[in-house]
Image: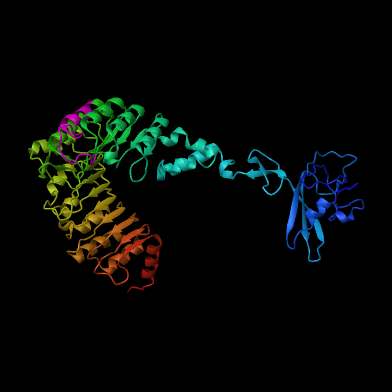
Amino acid sequence: MERGILGVKKDPKNPILCFINGGEWPSDDSKDEDFVASDSETKLSVTNNNKCSSETVKVVDINKSGSDVRNDTESPRVGKFVITRTSKANDKGTTKDKFVFRPKRQPNEHTKKVKRKKSTSNVSFETNDVIGPWGSVIPFDVLLLIFKYVVKSDGVLPFLKRASLVCGLWKQVAQHQSLWSHVDVSKPKVTMTEVELLSLCQKNSGSIRELNLGGWGNSLTLATISTIADTCSRLTGLNLSGCQNVTGSILRSIVDKCPKLNGIDISQISDRVTSDGPVTCNTIRYVGEKLGYRLVRLSIAGNILSGLPGIIIVISETCHELRELDMSNVATKDRGNVTIHVEKLQQGCSKLRVLRLANVTMRLSTVPLSDQAASPGFPELEELSIAKKNGSYFQGLDNASMERILKSSHKLKLLDLRGCSLITASGLVRIPAWDLEHLFLSQCSGAITPDLELVMRKWGHSLVQVDLSWNNQSGEVVDTAVTALATSPSHSPLRNLDLCGSAVSFDPVKSILCCCSNLNILNLSSCRGLPRGIKRVYQNDDLDKLRADVEASKHD
């Protein structure tokens, strides 16, 4: 009787299931005195030169000794093993069989058992495909926290959509309601159809609180907007910027269906004046009265309007809890100056923190001095932007107008005066705020006076970002201002300094590099007073290299 290494007839097509407790096995069947190779085994073993054939034998150990099992307690090979037999033909035509022991991996909660079938033979076997630690070991709460960080920095889409395809755990985490509170589907950031948008909103209707639909243009129909309002009735913030199909009636419908709204962005949706426009006195009054004290954010920027002074009065009468008001780039139908009753706005919206009036051709209304004195101002204001476009006939507001706006703004952190040529350094010194952090004075020719040094010394302890670009009228004034920033009595927090196109010289730049250790962005482009080779933007590592070169006197 033909017997193999285990004393049982061997069949290449049927692996042998056996039990072992260790011990040494012969490395060759020829050492078994009872072994006689069959014809089928000979064909399997003898192959062409440099070719191998192998068969896998599943070995299971139940840790029980028996009469047919070798009991060798000293052998380290105790437990479950897989025996692999490899046959290789040598140059003389003879074959040598080699048996290799390897421990069989035990399935656990982090492994997945998959049955596979070899395509080249009828031998089937089991294997354990280990899913990586991100799909098995990382706790749900930890993975959810990581996802929250990613969503906060990159947005919900397309990250969560891709993450849900990784494995079951990632899909479960990606569907957590806390991740879908702020959904940004603005174009061109996210590309999807109206059907996909509606499906997304319906699937996460109970989670979405902030929805950004900016940039959809004419592709977002009124029916879709109405359906979204019906589905996401818990919205607290809605961005419709650039959705040109929005009308006054649909905006009133949205306010009725979403009573918890506290922020609306309807910027850049009206390029012409219509009777049913979304930014009219009647529509704004309806929105303000319907939302009442809940409305804290309103943006009507980039629209062509009729009766803007009346809209501002309506806002002051109905939106008493407003915190942010953006009217940047607003134009009138006749492209004329806009008269703003700022004292009326101060009385009605005294809690305003952000006021943006950039690129608005405006002037403040003429009111008696007694009314100006009685006005409370904006005591909570933190950001004011009254910048204007370069080349416009409008020269911007003057010192008196700026003082009327900022009369009680002690908490001001950002002031954008780019292009305002009528504002001087003496007017800046009189601003009541003492901890300004961001100051933009690009192309402010009126501010480039010797008093600019006093401005920098007043706010040098708090300024984080300063823009003095394209002020090339007087290099000496810019030099003293930059030197004042560098020699601030307290440790300078300055991080961003823009001197592009200015008349600054090299010595003040050296002082800034040596004294402002927190600086990570420095713009020296087109600075005619600097040596060749350093007129560019420096960030991070490049800035560190420039600082080292300056300390080594390479540019002197």
Question: In the rendered image, which quarter is residue 404 located in?
Answer: top left
In the image, 37 versus 281, the foreground residue is 37
Q: Position of 453 compared to 533: left or right?
A: left
Vertical placement of residue 456 versus 190, above or below: below
Q: Quadrant of residue 375?
A: top left
Left or right? Give the position of 201 relative to 325.
right
| Chain part drawn in magenta | 267-289
Residue at x 32% of width, y 71% of height:
533
Residue lying furthest right: 33
Magenta segment includes 482: no
Question: Can I make out residue 515 in this image?
Answer: yes
Q: Is residue 490 left or right of residue 403?
A: right
> Secondary structure of the magenta portion, mostly?
loop
How far across and how far down the image is residue 479, in percent?
24, 64
Image point (89%, 41%), residue name: 68
Q: Looking at the picture, does residue 487 appear above or below residue 230? A: below
Q: Residue at x 20, y 39 (%)?
A: 270
Residue 79 % position (x, y): 78, 43
| Residue 487 seen | no
Q: Nearer the viewer, residue 539 or 214?
A: 214
Q: Is residue 283 magenta?
A: yes
Q: Pick the residue in front: 367 or 98.
A: 98
Q: Quick one: which residue is furthest to the front in this view?
A: 39
Colouring of the image: rainbow
Query: Residue 528: where, in percent of width, then height?
Result: 24, 69
Q: In x, y percent, where is residue 457?
A: 25, 56
How many numbered marks have been drawn onto this rendered protein structure?
A: 0
- Please identify the quadrant where the C terminus is shown: bottom left
